[in-house]
Amino acid sequence: MSTRVLIDHRKGGASKSRHPEKAHRPDNPIARKPEWIRVKAPSHPIYHETRKLMRDNRLVTVCEEAACPNIGECWSQRHATMMIMGEICTRACSFCNVTTGLPHALDDDEPQRVAEAVAKLGLRHVVITSVDRDDLADGGAMHFARVISAIRATSPETTIEILTPDFLRKNKALEVVVEAKPDVFNHNLETVPRLYPTIRPGARYYQSLRLLDRVKQLDPSIFTKSGLMLGLGEEKMEMAQVMDDLRIADVDFITMGQYLQPTVKHAAVARFVTPVEFEEYGTMARVKGFLQVSSSPLTRSSYHADADFAELREARAARLKGAL
């Protein structure tokens, strides 16, 4: 069985404003989704079993925090993704549905609890992500390393994919995470550089790019991965340039999916990119040399991550064989 779990520790009542930092922004009406983007409400019995398991183990998921449209499908297959270091983020990106504020102290028991959950579920591949923790001296790098180490100790056959923050102005933080040797290092660029000031104001495009490049310099054996949201106003030539930038950084895997607006206070959807256009972007990425490409309206960073990892390893092996 393969399961992707994201740990969340959501607390507090529903009456509390989820995005107080966005309250002053003008409303952006939420556009009606086209037919190709709609999904059915979850109803499968295993979905409810997975949900109960998360609650019983005090786990909160990014699937819920990010309002992922694939939650019904994934949870019905016992797939989820682990979110460590709490559910409160120190950043306030205009696309993101995760709560912004002052995070709680790190839970020293969390690495072991994550490892126990992975072992209990018998996962072949696990995805671990986190909120941004700019409040921590190392951005949470050592906590990532401790989680990876705990999983290795209890489930040595499980492959580990991490989706990290950018560790902006956190000296030597990246080295700590890479030394823990995850199988896949994912960091999402999210959008084209022109849109960073409005979409990802707390981040820097070239810092994110350098992060991915540095991973390969430190350990070429680690697969690198990055994701982009479409429909925010990006142009085709800008997308092509971002792909080129990622390939110069030797990134192996690119994911591209449709941005969906969480609330009226979030960035508006500029347009819904058609499935045909996603196929064209996917073709463009393959031509540029990515080992693995996932491009569709409902693609998300962790969507089908276990199957994608198996294909990624096969693609690298085939490329290395062809180079001999």
Image (cartoon, grey):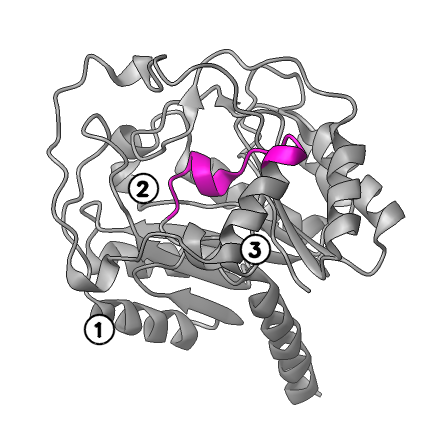
Three-letter amino acid code at the position of disc 1: Val
Secondary structure of residue under mark 3: loop
User: Mark 2 and mark 3 in contact (Cβ < 8 Å)?
Assistant: no
Residue at the location (36% across, 54% down)?
242
Q: Nearer the viewer, mark 1 or mark 2?
A: 1
For marks 1 and 2, the one nearer the N-term is 2
Q: Which residue is mark 2?
A: 193
Q: Quadrant of residue 206?
A: top left
Secondary structure of residue under mark 1: helix
Quarter of the image for the C terminus: give it. bottom right
Q: Nearer the viewer, mark 3 or mark 2?
A: 3
For marks 3 and 2, the one nearer the N-term is 3
Callout 3 crowding tier (Cα within 10 Å): few <14, some 14–19, many ≥20: many
Q: Which residue is mark 1?
A: 276
Three-letter amino acid code at the position of disc 2: Pro
Q: Please indicate whether residue 187 sits to the left or right of residue 4 in the image.
A: left
State the residue in front, 53 or 61: 53
Query: Where does the image place residue 277, in percent across and percent down from the top left?
Result: 22, 68
Q: Which residue is mark 3?
A: 79
Q: Quadrant of residue 30?
A: top left
For marks 1 and 3, the one nearer the N-term is 3
